[in-house]
Image (tube, rainbow, N blue to C red):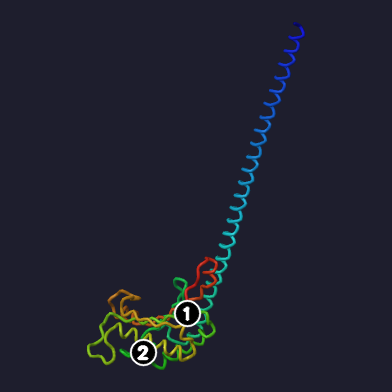
Amino acid sequence: MKFNFAKTSFSVLVCATMLASCVSSKKYEDLKASNEALTAEQAASKQKVDELTSSLKEREQKLAEMERQMNEQEKALNNLKNEINTSLKDFNQGDLSVNIKDGKVYVSMSDKLLFATGSTKVNPTGQKALNQLVDVLKKNQEVGVMVEGHTDDVEVLPGTKTIADNWDLSVLRATEITRMLTQKGLSPDRVTPSGRAYFQPADTGRTAAAKAKNRRTEIILTPDLTEVYKVLGIQAQK
């Protein structure tokens, strides 16, 4: 009887020990799996942080490069403006102006400087001014040129030979100047003529002085923005 009791007790003890061992083993495996999952999660989080850090650094570099390019563009525009002012300093400053606006250089010349009243042919003084402007533009080959003709709101007299209206007058004058610029050596693919008639006045007043200010030709010089477009990831249009 005592033997059977001892045997039974031993069996119970063995089973309990084995059960405890199984529980400990399962707990260990669970902890191990949990630790592995946590390690993987930490690795994924670190990778994401590294990617965000790299992306932020890349953006900062791109921003710095863009700022550098814009500073260079601003410097180039100011240099171009100064060159043009110097080349045209001998002309009546009341008949022309050189300004920077919207990232472009605007050379505004009055019709008095360039044309006789109602004419589309550039006078000798205007030719001299344009020749000196061409000399500057030849040294700045990357600059695009838009020639805009503007009139006042006084309609062209009916029956005026070869000129139908203010649209016609502004376009013909712009085309004449474009022709001169290209004949003097500017590449035709750099220069574009455009007529605005009286729809973009420099002065909206009704006085004679305001009308005179509106009768003008604007030569708009646009810098090459290819490098800026590259920084932005934009393909420059041809």
- For this rendering, which residue is in front, 199 or 39? 39
Name which residue lies at 32% across and 78% down. 210
- The image quarter in which residue 148 lies: bottom left
Instruction: Please provide percent x and percent y for residue 85.
Output: 49, 81
The numbered mark, 2 or 1, whose residue comes first in the sequence reads 2
Q: Residues within 10 Å of mark 2 (few under 14, many from 20)?
A: some
State the mark number for residue 144.
Answer: 1
Looking at the rendered structure, the kind of residue marked 2 is Phe
Label 1 packing within 10 angstroms: few (<14), some (14-19), many (20+)? some
Q: Nearer the viewer, residue 228 or 157?
A: 228
Tell me which corner region of the image, top left, top right, bottom left or bottom right, holds residue 194.
Answer: bottom left
Q: Is residue 200 above or below residue 181?
A: above
Disc 2 versus disc 1: nearer the observer: 1
Dot 1: element:
strand
The residue to which callout 2 is attached is 115
The residue sitting at the right extreme is: 3
Q: Amino acid at mark 1?
A: Gly
Q: Looking at this rendering, what residue extends furthest in the left direction?
A: 158
The residue sitting at the top extreme is 1
Residue appearing at x 48%, y 86% in the figure: 187
- Count every numbered label the image shows and give the total: 2
Q: Residue at x 54, y 75 (%)?
A: 76
Residue 151, compared with residue 46, is above or below; it is below
**Label 2 vs label 1: CA separation?**
24 Å
